[in-house]
Image (cartoon, helix red, strand yellow):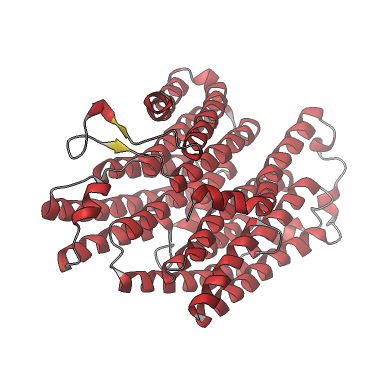
Amino acid sequence: MINDLLIPALIITPLIFGIAGFVFQKKATLWGLGFGSVFSLLSGALLYGVATRSLDTYHFGGFLPPLGIAFEALPLGSLILAFSALILLVVFLYAALSLTEAQAVLFYPLGAFLALGFVVIYLSRDLFNLYVGLEILGLSAVGLSALKNSSRSIHAALIYLFTTLVASGLYLVGVSMLYAQYALLDISSLALVVQDNFATLVAFGFMVTAFLIKTAVFPFSFWLPGAHANALSPVSALLSALVIKATFYLLYLFATTLFPFAVTIYTVLGSLGIVALFYGGIKAFLATDLKILIAYSTVSQVGYLMVVFAFTHTYAYYAMVFALLSHALAKSGLFLAGGAIIRRARTQTISALQGYASVTPVAVFAVGLSSVSLIGLPPSLGFVSKWYYLQSSFETSSWFFLAAILGGGIVSALYLFRLLILFLQKPLEEAGDPHRPEEHAPLQRFTCSTLQWSAFSLSFLSVFLGFISQFIIGFLGP
C-alpha cells in the first residue's frame, strides 16, 4: 500500500505546492515552508521503505515497460533524495528570513519544481523521462540563479541557461541514438541487450559530455563560478549542494548499469577528477571574493566524485557516496554561513572580513566545521570518504591517485585555513562597530542568529555523520 501512494505523492506534492506558491503569492513563504516539511517527511518515508524492503518498482497506470514508465527507489537514489529534502528544508527556513517578499514569490515555487526534478532523476528508470527531469531541474535552477536581479546575476544566469540547454540537447541526441539501435528506453530492459559497439559508445559519449557540463566537471566548469557566486546565498547553496549532484548521479548510474564496458572513457573521467581537484583548489586560493572562493571550492570537490571512475574496488563506491553526502552538507552549510557573514558585513571581499569570528561566531564555527569535512579531517564524513579512496588506492596499487587525493586535501586546507585564519584575527575597526543597527534591533539580532544556526546545522551534520558511516554502508549494501 505504501508503494501505491508514496512515489505518486512525491511527484504530485511539488506540483501542488509550487503552483499554489505562484497563485497565492502573498503566502508564498508559508507554502514553501509547508512544502519543505511535507517533502522531507515523504522522502524520509521513502528511505524507510527502501531500508525495510517494503518498496518495489512503481509502474504508472499499471503499464509495464516498454509501454509504461517505471519508477524505482534504489538505495543510493533514495538516500540522496532524503538528504536533498533535508537540505532543501533548511535552506527554505534560511530563505524565509533572508529574502525579500518579491524574491520569495519566485524562490519557493521554483524550489518546489527543483525538488520535482530531483524526484524524477533519482527514481525514474526511463531515459526520456530522465530528460524531462533534467529540463525541469535545469530551468528551475536557471530561474533561481537570476533572482538576485543584478546585471551580473542575470548575465551568469543566461550563460547557465544556454549551457544547460546545449547539454540537454547532447543528452537527447544520445538517447535518440540508443533508441534507434535498441527500440528501448527503460534502463533495466536496455541493460540486458546493450552491446559494446561503436554506435553505442558514440551515444554514451554524447550523454557523458552532457553530464560533465551539467555537473561542472573541469574543463566544463566555466559556467559555475559566475552562476553560484552571483546568486542569492540560499540559491547558491541549492545549486552547489544539490543540483550538480543529481546529474553526477545519472552519470554514475549509466556508467555502472548501461555501459560498464566503456573502460577507456572511465579512465579519462577519473583523470579529469584529479585535474579538477587542483584547478579548482588553486583558483579558490587566489580568490578575493568569498562566494567566488566557495564556488571554485565546488569545482575542486567535484573532482573527488569523479575519482570513483578510476577504480573498480567496492571501497571506491563507498568513498564516492560519502564524498557526495559530505560535500552536499558541508557546501550548503558553507554558502549559508558565508551569506550570513556577507549580510552582516555588507561586502563579499575576503580581506574586509578580518576578525568576523567575533561578529558572527556561529557562522564562522560553521565555516570551520565545513572546512573539516571538505579537507577530510577526522572524524568527519569527508575523512571517511578519503579513507576509503586511500584504501582503494592501496588495494589496486594506484599510487598516482593516492598522491593526488592527499594533495587535493592539502590544497583544500590551504584556501580554507587561509579563510579561517583571517576570520580569527583581530577585528577591523568597522567589523566591530557598536553603532550598527543590527546590534540593537531585536528582530535583526534574531534573524542574524537564526541564519547562522541554520548554516551550523548542515555543517555539523557533515562532521557528525562520520561517526555513523557504517550504518550508511549497511543501508547501501555490497
* Viewer-side residue, 365 vs 358: 365
Which image quarter is the N terminus in? top left
Q: Is residue 82 visible?
A: yes
Q: Say how many tags the image has.
A: 0
On the image, which quarter does residue 181 sit in?
A: bottom left
* Viewer-side residue, 66 vs 476: 476
On screen, residue 113 above or below 310: above
Q: Residue 389 location in percent, x, y?
A: 55, 68
Q: Residue 258 location in percent, x, y?
A: 28, 57
Q: Residue 137 location in percent, x, y?
A: 39, 42
Q: Is residue 443 left or right of residue 95?
A: right
On screen, residue 320 above or below 6: below
Residue occupying the point 37% across, 73% down: 268
Q: Is residue 270 left or right of residue 468?
A: left
Residue occupying the point 58% across, 34% down: 89
Q: Is residue 127 left or right of residue 273?
A: left
Residue occupying the point 63% across, 56% down: 381
Q: Is residue 3 left or right of residue 92?
A: left
* Viewer-side residue, 203 vs 315: 315
* Viewer-side residue, 413 vs 188: 188
Q: Is residue 334 visible?
A: no
Residue occupying the point 55% across, 58% down: 323
On the image, which quarter does residue 68 sit in?
A: top left
Q: Residue 420 location in percent, x, y?
A: 75, 61
